[in-house]
Image: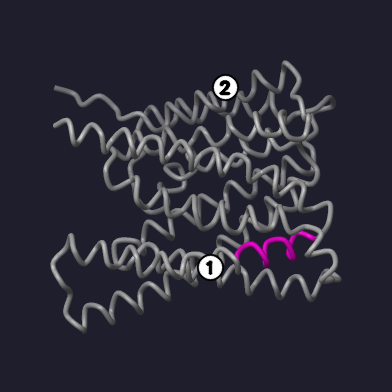
Amino acid sequence: MESGNRKSLQSSVMLLITAWIWGVAFVAQSEGMNYVGGFTFNACRFIIGGIVLIPCIFLLQKVNREQKKPLTMEEKQARKRKGIVGGVCCGVFLCLASSLQQFGIAFTTVGKAGFITALYIILVPVLGLFMKKKVGRNVWFSVGIAALGMYLLCIKEGFSVGKGDFLVFLCSIGFSLHILVIDYFSPKADGVVISCVQFFTAGIISGAGMFLFEQPSWGAITAAWMPVLYAGIMSCGVAYTLQVIAQKDIAPTIASLLMSLESVFSVLAGWLLLGQRLSGKELAGCVLVFVGIVLAQLPERKKN
């Protein structure tokens, strides 16, 4: 029992670190746009993230072999194929969502981008309706609270929405679709393989956008080395690996609640590192969005 509690505590700490890394990544993305275009930034960070995950595949596969019964050659080949197909599909949606986020963050604050992006936690069960999945009353209640929060956070005088806020909201829809695709493929293949392939896929697509719509230069990329390396190594490689390891020893509800703190950390990071401050109205919107996010993840009481 004591060993289980220790593992749960260690997992909680790892997920808190993960949420902090992802929260600070919004700063890296914002700063990176001062040097390179959105496609260039994403192409570099995703390729770096894919490279970082390659050794993690072998490490985690070794751990899984020790914990699970061995697979036959046919089963291994089937999982490998599905991992590649799933990774490519996930990579397309990851590229779409990340591109919208990267371009949107150039026109809004880091904190607002963090909270608007986190709406995917609420949107996933709502979009699940199209896949004939049931949505609990708590989710609909959380949608109402989050909608009010979004009004306070994003709507300006004259009932207009900022360009950056709108792009980041579209990004949250993209990430919702990305998670639904992951949900479909993850039981059929190795999660780390899917992630590694999706990073390379997103990197290649972003690279095409980089050469078609931007004028990348080695000088600009090297000038952005710190944000790019942070987003590639820490956000893609380290944080994802911590998440995969930690989620094995902690309840899914607690895990998702801890990771949703990413939005809170993005506000703190934007304030501490960039000096960005939100107005009282915007902070009230952040609070309501976060309350909605938390409510959406709480299990409903079962009727006796």
Q: Which residue is at 48% across, 39% downward? A: 17
- State the quadrant of the C terminus: top left
Q: Which residue is at 64% across, 23% downward? A: 285
| Secondary structure category for the residue under label 1 | helix
Q: Which residue is at 76% across, 43% downward? A: 164
**x and y percentages locating residue 16 in the rendered image:** 46, 36
Taking depth in this image into account, of 156 and 28 the one nearest to the observer is 28
Q: Which residue is mark 2?
A: 288
Residue 39 lies in the magenta-colored region: yes
- Looking at the image, residue 21 sits to the left or right of residue 43; the answer is left
Q: Quadrant of residue 206?
A: bottom right
Q: Which residue is mark 1?
A: 50
Is the stretch drawn in magenta largely helix, strand or loop?
A: helix
> Label 2 sits on what residue type?
Leu
Q: Quadrant of residue 73?
A: bottom left
| Secondary structure category for the residue under label 2 | helix
Residue 123, compared with residue 146, is above or below; it is: below
Between tags 1 and 2, which lies in front?
1
Taking depth in this image into account, of 114 and 222 the one nearest to the observer is 222
Q: Which residues are magenta?
A: 37-46
Q: CA distance from mark 1 to mark 2?
A: 35 Å
**x and y percentages locating residue 255 in the rendered image:** 37, 38
Mark 2 is surrounded, within 10 Å at the Cα level, by few (under 14), some (14 to 19) or many (20 or more) other residues, namely many
> Label 1 sits on what residue type?
Gly
